[in-house]
Image (tube, rainbow, N blue to C red):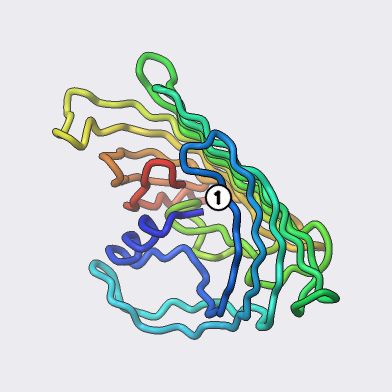
Amino acid sequence: MRGDIANSLSFFFAGDDFRNYYEADRVALFLRGTRTARWSPIVEVEWEKARSLAASDQFVLFAGDEAIVNPEIDAGETVVLRGGVEVKRRTTETSLRARAVVEVADSSVAGDYSYTFGELRAAWAGPALIGHGVEAFALLRSDLSGTLPRQRWTAVGGLATLPRVPLLAERGGRFVYGQVTYLVPVERFRVGLLGPPRLFLRAATGAAWNEGEPAGFETNLGAGVRLFVFELAVAVDPGADDLDPAVYATLRFPGDL
């Protein structure tokens, strides 16, 4: 859910890495629309040979250098066909980016795995009352048939999604996540080209699980201030016996989660 730049910088400064890494050799052929197209087809054919990746020490500027464990994946070859559509709309006040993709693998044709996997993703930003703003993000992923290899699972937890849930705490082939952020610009304290700081309130909820397991949704409520791409905030779990607020900082780029 996080872009490469935001994730890499978050790790470099604070050790907050939001991904489960694995090694893979990969060859792909893909068809996409132009960057300016309002809608684009998504057609991809991909071969991947994947294997688990051991943890290794990395330099972190403001945190310990302890290695982050990468959960194991299902090693082997996967050959997939992906098809879908991406829609982009932008006006002077609003922006919308959404995509729907279905991924199909069949071991009787090629590879070691057979499954069908679907994804729906949408991000919207626009105005609210009296110069305020609203941002919304939603992501749904699910195995539709077959057994999904673990390298296709999705995880929730960590500062970018649910700060009161440990990083990669919930993982599975079925995944639902959504968040809404309400922003209030404070023009009095505008900082040159960076613009005004914006106070915000955020509600986020999500769950990751597998077939036969219950979907254990977690919800976090947060408040803080954003200046350009930097956020300083506090988050709580409203369902916990002890709210135990978490104070955190992270980077959030425009168009990124």
Which residue in the structure is indicated by mark 1?
A: 240
**Residue 112, image x, y percentages:** 76, 79
**Vertical position of residue 106 compared to residue 56: above or below:** above
In the rendered image, the vertical position of residue 16 relative to residue 95, given as above or below: below
Image side of residue 115 versus residue 193, left or right: right
Q: Is residue 98 above or below residue 152?
A: above
Relative to 108, is 189 on the left or the right?
left
* Most foreground residue, 27 or 129: 27
Residue 14 x/y as whole percent: 31, 64
User: Residue 99's x, y, as percent?
Assistant: 61, 43
Tell me if 207 is positioned left or right of 189 in this view.
right
* Residue lying at the far top of the rendered structure: 130
Kind of residue at disc 1:
Ala
Residue at point 53%, 77% (across, down): 22
Q: Is residue 63 left or right of residue 74?
A: left
Is residue 216 visible to the viewer in this orientation of the structure? no
Q: Which quarter of the figure has residue 113?
A: bottom right
Packing grade of label 1 (10 A; few <14, some 14-19, many >=20) is few
Residue 131 against residue 59 in the figure, above or below:
above
Q: Nearer the viewer, residue 106 or 252?
A: 106
Q: Looking at the image, which residue is at 20% across and 37% down? A: 194
At horizontal 74% and vertical 58% (from top left) the residue drawn is 117
Give the image quarter of residue 55: bottom left
Task: Give the percent coordinates (x, y) of residue 69.
Answer: 48, 79
**Label 1's element?**
loop
Q: Quadrant of residue 40?
A: top right
Task: Write the residue at 68% across / 48% down.
Answer: 84
User: Could one spot residue 58 in this view of the protein?
Assistant: yes
